[in-house]
């Protein structure tokens, strides 16, 4: 077992990179060491030649409860420059999730609140247990879920995003799925098995095609319609030249 930091346990099993938040006594609350460990795990994932998907989970009962008391105390005692650097570090984590070539899947059981909800939202795919709870609760202490807003408003409607970030309420996994914050909800008793089956599904599709698709999808964010279409043309031509596509076409033609 490879461990990047005591707060984050990182292992690679076959084609799956497993990233576990490992502060169960603190409900996997975010602190500097945990954020740093997540970044290191994602960097290692990006360097693996066989990994097809990264799975982020939380040890214990909850996925992630946001910042812990020590982190909040640090915020209250820090200067503007220090707080900017701290916010920049979290922003870098969210951006890194999108830059990692393979899909990053959050498997949420228990609570994903405040920064923990932001972390889940930043992932490419969110799977939730039926009893999971989600919430951007920062406004309750005068804080703002600032960086994650750029991602949240791409996931849900503008009015729903406004309500989520200004009311600070917790919502159920079922509601999160209904509004587009969660991809799939699984029964609690079957959650681990369903998550395993889901991530193993990436073994059945082309690794290079998935990586190229992820890059193009996010690259289109700030493009005009015509520019996005042209980027699609360029990547389409590139995909045709990959080994996976060449082999796939050959198999198809042979079957026909």
Image (cartoon, rainbow, N blue to C red):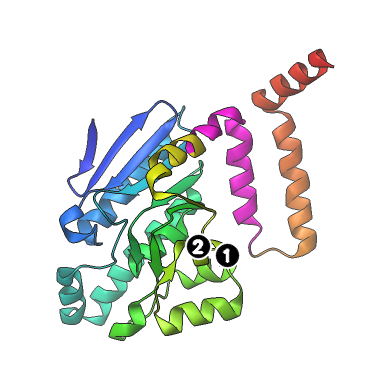
Residue 231 in view:
yes
Q: Is residue 232 magenta?
A: no
Q: Is residue 80 left or right of residue 230?
A: left
SS state under label 2: helix
**Which x, y percent locates residue 83?**
27, 75
Query: Callout 2 environment at 10 Å: few (<14), some (14 to 19), or many (20+)?
Result: some
Task: Determine which residue is flagged by label 1.
Answer: 178
Q: Residue at x 57, y 64 (%)?
A: 178
| Quarter-of-image position of residue 61 | bottom left
Q: Residue at x 64, y 49 (%)?
A: 216
For the N terminus, the image quarter is: top left
Question: In this picture, is 202 found above or below 136?
Answer: above
Pointers 1 and 2 in contact (C-beta within 8 Å): yes
Question: In this picture, is 16 found above or below 95?
Answer: above
Q: Is residue 213 magenta?
A: yes
Q: Rounded to the nearest whole Å, what is the CA distance between mark 1 and mark 2?
A: 6 Å
Question: In this picture, is 6 found above or below 152?
Answer: above
Numbered tag placed on residue 188 in the rendering:
none
Task: Give the magenta-colored segment's residue range.
Answer: 199-221
| Quarter-of-image position of residue 85 | bottom left
Numbered tag placed on residue 174 in the rendering:
2
SS state under label 1: helix
Residue sitting farthest toward the right? 256
């Amino acid at each position: 077992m490879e461990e990047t930091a005591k707060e984050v346990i990182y292992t690679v099993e076959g084609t799956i990179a497993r990233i576990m938040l490992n502060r169960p006594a603190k409900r996997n609350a975010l602190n500097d060491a945990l954020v740093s460990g997540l970044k290191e795990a994602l960097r290692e994932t990006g360097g693996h030649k066989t990994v097809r998907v990264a799975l982020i989970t939380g040890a214990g009962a909850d996925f992630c409860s946001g910042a812990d008391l020590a982190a909040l105390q640090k915020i209250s005692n820090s200067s503007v420059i220090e707080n900017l650097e701290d916010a920049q570090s979290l922003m870098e984590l969210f951006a890194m999730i999108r830059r990692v070539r393979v899909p990053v899947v959050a498997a949420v059981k228990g609570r994903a609140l405040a920064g923990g909800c932001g972390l889940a939202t930043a992932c490419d795919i969110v799977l939730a247990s039926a009893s999971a709870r989600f919430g951007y609760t920062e406004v309750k202490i005068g804080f703002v879920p600032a960086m994650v807003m750029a991602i949240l408003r791409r996931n849900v409607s503008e009015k729903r995003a406004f309500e989520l970030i200004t009311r600070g309420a917790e919502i159920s996994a079922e509601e999160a799925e209904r509004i587009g914050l969660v991809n799939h909800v699984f029964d609690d008793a079957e959650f681990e098995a369903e998550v395993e089956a889901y991530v193993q599904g990436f073994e059945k599709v082309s690794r290079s095609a998935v990586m190229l698709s992820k890059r193009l999808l996010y690259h289109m964010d700030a493009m005009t319609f015509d520019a996005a279409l042209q980027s699609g043309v360029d990547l389409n031509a590139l995909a045709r030249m990959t080994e996976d596509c060449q082999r796939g076409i050959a198999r198809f033609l042979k079957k026909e």
